[in-house]
Every structure is written in structure tokens, then in C-alpha cells.
Image (cartoon, rainbow, N blue to C red):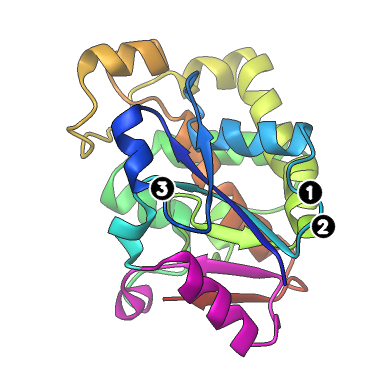
Amino acid sequence: MKLKIYQIYYSWFQWFSVQHGFKPYFNAGSNRYLENQVILDCYQNHRFKNCDYFGVLSWRFEEKTKLNFDQIANFIKKEKSSADVYAFFQDPDQRSRVKKNMWKHAVEMWHPPLFIEIGQMIFDELKIKANILDLETPVIYSNYWIARPQVFAGYVERLLAPAVKIMEENETIKRLCYEDSGYDRQKSISIKQREKIFGRPYFTFHPFICERLFSSWLALNPNIRFNYIS
């Protein structure tokens, strides 16, 4: 079994957090889509091929999940690679406390109602006949998931890339995405850094909309076998 998992870092001191087994990915040109842009780049550059599972994680992965590469590999081997997608969550008990819709949960915890309006507008533009609030989405944060290459490609081709295209080209959605997302927990990112990444002194909606897309993809495709590693 071959795992190809990239761990993103943005500066030299973060490089020391890249774990054994993961492939370092220096994201010097981070933009408003954050790791979602890396996912798109890995698809366009065919990095997701020639492996059994592929993923893109942040440099803080071990800090947030308490997991390492060997634990992931051993879990999948023990399970005999039974799932198409594995997600990581640091607190298994918390999963049961999170409501079964990541869009609704996001508004309850962090973002204004505009977040749901934008998400639904994107789905409508994509001709996806679904109310995003009705989707039973698995609990996935921070793009902490790995998938079989064909699942990864299907998600990027049919949802992530088209959604980003709409966010860039639909004038109404584009304008709304640049509004303040209300997210201010990441105090380590200065206003100067926010202005560089988002073009605004605050976090825009772009990365948070994308963060909910993969769990929505799984809800729309129940044939994809899914499990947690924690």
C-alpha cells in the first residue's frame, strides 16, 4: 500500500513540523483559497497519481490530531483498505456532538448566515439539486482527509474546481465571497498577512466555503466508502 500525503508549510520554521513519511510542500504563494489551492495544483500537476491514497494536510496536523504517518498507515492496513476516504478528527466523542450538517454548524459556531447563502448560490449555479442544509455531511475540518486517487480526481473535477471557477467569475458570488467571514480565531495571522493573502484585513469566505465542499461531496455520493482515523 502506498500513501502519498503532502504536508504544507509556509515558512522555514514550519518545515520542522513536517512529519516523517509525509511529503513536504512549500506553499510560498498562499492565496485566499489556502490549502484548497494546493489541492487544485496537485490535481493539475498529476501529483495524486501512482498511489493508493492521496491527501494534502497542514503543517499543524500532528498538533491538531495527535496522529502521525505510521499510525495512519497501520490503521489502513489493519482495516485492509476498506474505505475509499479516511478523515482525521482529534476528538471522536465530539463527532457525535456536532450536528450532521457542516454548513449549519459553521454558522452556529463562526460565520454569519451569508455563509449559507453563498454556498447555496454556488450549488445552484452548478445545477446541483440539493439544499445544502439538508445534506448529512460527515464531520471534516481543515481538509483533513485522504482519498483514493479516483475519488480525489472526481471531487476536484466535479465540485472543487467548478466551485472555485464560479467564485472567481460570477460577479455577485465573487463580491459576496470577499465579505468578512467573521472568523477571527486565528490570531497568529496578523492584519498585514491577512491583507496579503485575502486582499482584506479580515478572513474572507473563500477557504471556508471550500472547506465544506468535500463533506458535501461525500453526502452527495453515498456510494463512496468513508471512515475516520482518530
What kind of residue is marked 2?
Gln
Query: In terms of secondary structure, where does tag 1 sit?
Result: helix
Query: What residue is pinned by disc 2?
Result: 150
Tell me where residue 25 appears, x and y as whole percent: 53, 36
What kind of residue is marked 1?
Ala
Residues at circles 2 and 3 in contact by the CB criterion of under 8 Å: no
Residues at circles 2 and 1 in contact by the CB criterion of under 8 Å: yes
What kind of residue is marked 3?
Val
Instruction: Give the mark nearest the N terminus, 3 or 1.
Output: 3
Residue plotted at (46% across, 57% down):
20
In depth, the one of 28 and 228 nearer the eye is 28
**Is any atom of residue 127 visible in this view?**
no
Residues at circles 3 and 1 in contact by the CB criterion of under 8 Å: no
How packed is label 1: few (under 14 Cα within 10 Å), some, or many (20 or more)?
A: some
Q: CA distance from mark 2 to mark 3?
A: 26 Å
Nearer the camera: disc 3 or disc 1: 3
**Is any atom of residue 166 visible in this view?**
yes
Residue plotted at (62% across, 12% down):
171
Q: CA distance from mark 2 to mark 1?
A: 5 Å
Query: What residue is pinned by disc 3?
Result: 18
- Look at the picture and state if 37 lies above or below 198: below
Query: What residue is pinned by disc 1?
Result: 153
Tell me where residue 80 appears, x and y as whole percent: 69, 87
